[in-house]
Amino acid sequence: MQVCLASTSPARLMLLRQVGIEPVTLAPGVDEEAVISATEAREARVLPPAEHVLLLARLKAADVAGRVREAHPGFEGVVIGGDSMFELDGVVYGKPYTPEAATERWRGMRGRTGVLHSGHSVLLVRGDDEPVEAFAVAEATVTFAADVEDEEIAAYVATGEPLHVAGAFTVDSLGGAFIERVEGDPSTVVGMSLSTVRRLVRQLGVSWTSLWSTEA
């Protein structure tokens, strides 16, 4: 059973490899800002974090599922899509992109607890059948150390690591030392909840161990 990761995220790829899955990868062609803006305008409301990440995860997986056989002829298996956002005191944070934004985030996060929302979509692509989907949202709370100094924040931001990750932090790399506690599936904070993906795969009637690569 083949696996396609609908993402170019190194963290998500690393997670799958750590549990014995060697996926092919394909970048989704989804304009995230345009999709959210159009949806919120149409529904005249701001999407809460769980709906936000789930909508994007589903669109990313669907986009890649529709193209995977062009890139990988004969593909038979599952396509996994995901999206994440960090929420602190009701405010939602995506990727900061700039050092200034990342610095401001970290100064506001130290000593506090937020929630990482992660949307997941798994599509089974098999034969000539229409892809079948299972989807869910996973959440994990993250508590940051209160004694993180401005100098440490500056050094961390200077590495560039926090600029392109949801919430401006990682738990599995340089940012991990500044995080005191994670409640929930820790892989959720890395990029996707492996336990959630396993559950979705099983809902589609696929054995999780059938996704393991022959080299695992």
Image (spheres, rainbow, N blue to C red):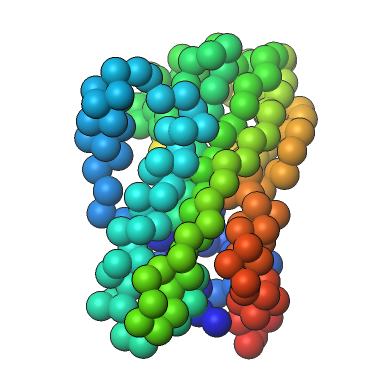
Q: Is residue 85 left or right of residue 30?
A: right
212 shown above or below 79: below
Image location (x, y in percent) of residue 105 = 49, 18
Quadrant of the rendering where the C terminus is positioned:
bottom right
Q: How many marks?
A: 0
Q: State whether residue 58 appears in this view.
A: yes
Q: Quadrant of residue 34?
A: top left
3 shown above or below 49: below
Q: Is residue 133 left or right of residue 45?
A: right
Q: State whether residue 148 appears in this view.
A: no
For the view shown, which residue lies furthest in the front direction?
129
Q: Is residue 174 left or right of residue 43?
A: right
Image location (x, y in percent) of residue 204 = 58, 67
185 and 169: which is toward the camera: 185
Image location (x, y in percent) of residue 6 = 41, 60
Image location (x, y in percent) of residue 102 = 44, 24
Q: Quadrant of residue 114?
A: top right
193 and 125: which is toward the camera: 125
Q: Is residue 73 left or right of residue 113?
A: left
85 shown above or below 90: below
User: At x 55% / y 82%, what residue is drawn?
Assistant: 1
User: At x 74% / y 38%, what residue is drawn?
Assistant: 184
User: At x 65% / y 52%, what residue is drawn?
Assistant: 196
